[in-house]
Image (cartoon, helix red, strand yellow):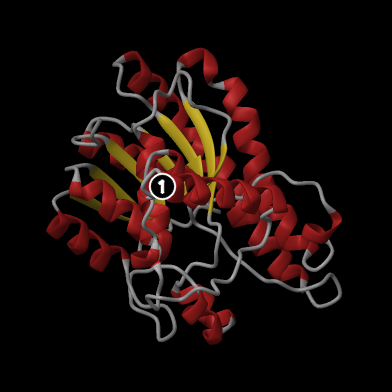
Amino acid sequence: MSLKDRVLFITGASRGIGLAIALRAAKDGAKIAVAAKTVEPLPTLPGTIYTAAKEIEKAGGKALPLVCDIRDEEAVKAAINKTVQTFGGIDIVVNNASAISLTDTESTPLKRYNLMNEINARGTWLVTKYAIPHLIESAQKSRNPHVMAISPPLSMKQKWFSPHVAYTMSKFGMSMSILGWSGELKQYGIAANALWPLTAIDTAALNILDKSIASKARKPEIMADAAHVVFIQDAQTYTGKFDIDELVLRENGQTEFDHYSSVPGTTDLLPDIFIDDEVFERVRQLKMQAERRRSPRL
């Protein structure tokens, strides 16, 4: 399957993972609404909705740059309506926009707490709320509609909460919405899935937190390729999943991953947070299976 002529509404698509997902879809000839706040490049965060739109067009897609603060209900409604007016509907919603602060409770100002929860949990819910009528129309036209959140598996272990309670609450809020929508929207044939990286991803936001991590991270393209695999799955049956990028790709036959590394040849990639030991064990098993298939039989 291809995403040709499919309409994607992607929040936070001016850079990073959101832009990578948009560019992968553009290669198929998709139509992409770039919903983000940045209209002028920032010193620490390069990329705007307009530069992203140019890259999407160059990659083979059609782009609609939209100034949209997903904390603002009227802005969200206007962006959704403009997308439908321009492209005729919406088939895929990618809730990528996110705010982060890996701080403990005493070190987290209320303003930062509000920002994370308003963008991550509330923003994801708000964008999807106003997209649902159009996703239902997409399903009625057999266009395989999907909702995705870039959010982690719902692992209720203390270690994922105690270092950064506010951030975890906001990201798990996104994942809880996915869990709920997978049931709520199943009657319409709309899929709802989450996607999260196995390792740290080299983005401008990550470099603000810690520049040293980049050399042990992967490029956003691994998330884009994994998202593409999810989007071409049957929306009526592939729903309620909390996917991990490398697992999705390995389970669909991919065996080479070094090209995703920010520094090719890196063997000590930094695991992302919210990844339980069972996930790493599953990756190890799939690696062993792939190696056995490559090895000649004695």
- Tell me if mark 1 has few (under 14), some (14-19) or many (20+) residues whose alpha carbon lies within 10 angstroms of its own: many
Q: Amino acid at mark 1?
A: Ala
How far from the left and from the top, in percent, is residue 20? Answer: 34, 58
Which residue sits at x=38%, y=68%? 38
Above/below status of 207 relative to 61: below
| Left or right, residue 63 beside residue 270 | left
Q: Quadrant of residue 37?
A: bottom left
Q: Nearer the viewer, residue 129 or 297?
A: 297
Residue, disc 1: 226
Q: Quadrant of residue 136?
A: top left
| Left or right, residue 137 beside residue 88 | right
Quadrant in the picture for the C terminus = top left
Q: Is residue 79 visible?
A: no
Q: Nearer the viewer, residue 293 or 267?
A: 293
| Left or right, residue 147 beside residue 241 | left
Which residue sits at x=82%, y=60%? 159
Above/below status of 272 relative to 194: below
Q: Is residue 60 visible?
A: yes
